[in-house]
Amino acid sequence: MTARFRNRADAGRALAELLTAYAGRDDVIVLGLPRGGVPVAHEVARRLGLPLDVLVVRKLGVPGHEELAMGAIAGSGVRVVNHDVVRELGLSEAAIDAVAAREEQEVRRRETAYRGDRVPLDVADRVVIVVDDGLATGATMRAAVAALKTLAPKRLVVGVPTAAPPVRDELAREADEVVCVITPEPFGAVGFWYDDFSQTTDDEIRTLFPA
């Protein structure tokens, strides 16, 4: 059986070993997806000598069927809409705006909680390594990739310790590069591949950023 990671820091160190080509470059930044992706991203950034920031992504659920995504929003006011879902369900612009406004409040709350007064790192014309602790369905990462593409990065790299093979392959068609330490099959859940997969708290995330 494929070896498991001790915890998210251990997973971040293993992932960093596969990203050494980006070490120390002044055109590369690392973004962690809260909450669980941030400790992994922190270790990657620390090992490679790269700046670290968070990217808060929120799904836009269809009213009354919130599990179905009609789009997503991310920090900096980026909104991505799944036009196929919108057309099929006949959703109005007002309905989308109402859901987006509610989720934007949560994005701002989380960004303030995690980043404080620090200015977000500039993505434009940079190599962006966006990190999560694993990919089971890949929904959040796909939203992150779509959002980041609107900000004109030079290169978009998805980095994760573990992923379901089909999800990794799907993201490889959307990002410029996908770097994954293990792709076990059968996959199950992300947490299965960690000895310690305890929930990451807002306070823990804040400690990973300089004051």
Image: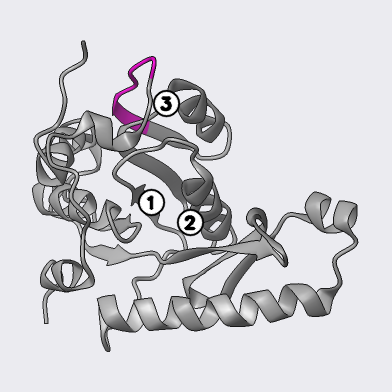
Q: Amino acid at mark 2?
A: Pro
Q: Residue furthest top?
A: 1
Residue at image position (49%, 40%) is: 138
User: Of the numbered discs in the image, which one, if any, rests on residue 153?
Assistant: 2
Q: Residue furthest bottom?
A: 117
Q: Amino acid at mark 3?
A: Ala
Q: Which residue is mark 1?
A: 127
Q: Is residue 145 left or right of residue 18?
A: right
Q: Amino acid at mark 1?
A: Val
Residues shaded magenta:
179-186
Q: Is residue 74 magenta?
A: no
Q: Is residue 182 magenta?
A: yes
Q: Which of 8 and 43 lies nearest the eye of the viewer?
A: 8
* Spot occupied by residue 21 in the image (x, y as percentages of width and height): 23, 36
Q: Which of 188 and 105 lies nearest the eye of the viewer?
A: 188
Q: Quick check: 17 above or below 69?
A: above
> Please, what secondary structure does the residue beneath circle 1 have?
strand
Q: Which residue is mark 3?
A: 164
> Please, what secondary structure does the residue beneath circle 3 have?
loop
Q: Quick check: 178 above or below 33?
A: above
Spatial separation of the CA atoms under disc 3 and disc 1: 24 Å
Q: Marks 2 and 1: in contact by CB < 8 Å?
A: yes
